[in-house]
């Protein structure tokens, strides 16, 4: 119910949903780079899979030779040969 109220408020005030609801912003550039904003923590890092915990979901990046190029408290860049980017419900 609270998310529904926040969603309506965001729509009425023309504020992006990610700001109000804490949704992650995922930008994929080609097959080599994924930029993620609004994440909470890095769950696991493997050469073929990286799992990132966001507030509302878990982000799973699969591919080959994956690595985190950089990360800050607010955003990160994952590089490698990206096969898929998906989210899992909590």
Image (spheres, rainbow, N blue to C red):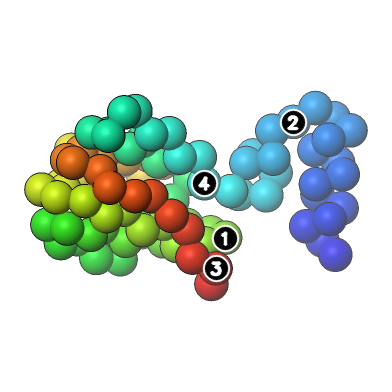
Residue behind mark 4: 24
Most distant residue in the bottom direction:
90
Compared to residue 79, the image places residue 84 above or below, namely below
Compared to residue 89, the image places residue 69 above or below, namely above
The mark found on residue 15 in the picture is 2
Residue behind mark 1: 56
Whether pointer 3 and pointer 2 mark residues with C-beta atoms closer than 8 Å, the reply is no
Q: Is residue 39 visible?
A: yes
Residue shown at the point (40%, 41%) measured from the top left: 36
Q: Is residue 71 visible?
A: no
CA distance separating discs 2 and 1 = 18 Å
Mark 2 crowd level (few <14, some 14–19, many ≥20, 10 Å Cα): few
Whether pointer 4 and pointer 2 mark residues with C-beta atoms closer than 8 Å, the reply is no
Q: Quadrant of residue 86?
A: bottom left
Compared to residue 35, the image places residue 42 above or below, namely below
The mark found on residue 8 in the picture is none
Whether pointer 4 and pointer 1 mark residues with C-beta atoms closer than 8 Å, the reply is yes
Residue behind mark 3: 89
Which circle, 3 or 1, is nearer the viewer? 3
Mark 1 crowd level (few <14, some 14–19, many ≥20, 10 Å Cα): some
Q: Mark 4 vs mark 1: which is more N-terminal?
A: 4
Residue shown at the point (31%, 28%) measured from the top left: 30
Mark 4 crowd level (few <14, some 14–19, many ≥20, 10 Å Cα): many
Q: Mark 4 vs mark 2: which is more N-terminal?
A: 2
Q: Mark 3 vs mark 4: which is more N-terminal?
A: 4
Mark 3 crowd level (few <14, some 14–19, many ≥20, 10 Å Cα): few
Q: How many marks?
A: 4
């Amino acid at each position: 119910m609270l998310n529904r109220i926040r969603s309506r408020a965001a729509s009425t005030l023309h504020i992006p949903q990610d700001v109000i609801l804490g949704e992650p912003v995922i930008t994929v550039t080609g097959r080599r780079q994924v930029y993620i904003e609004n994440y909470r923590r890095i769950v696991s890092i493997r050469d073929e899979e990286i799992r990132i915990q966001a507030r509302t979901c878990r982000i799973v990046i699969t591919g080959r030779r994956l690595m985190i190029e950089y990360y800050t408290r607010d955003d990160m860049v994952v590089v490698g040969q990206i096969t898929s980017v998906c989210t899992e419900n909590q």
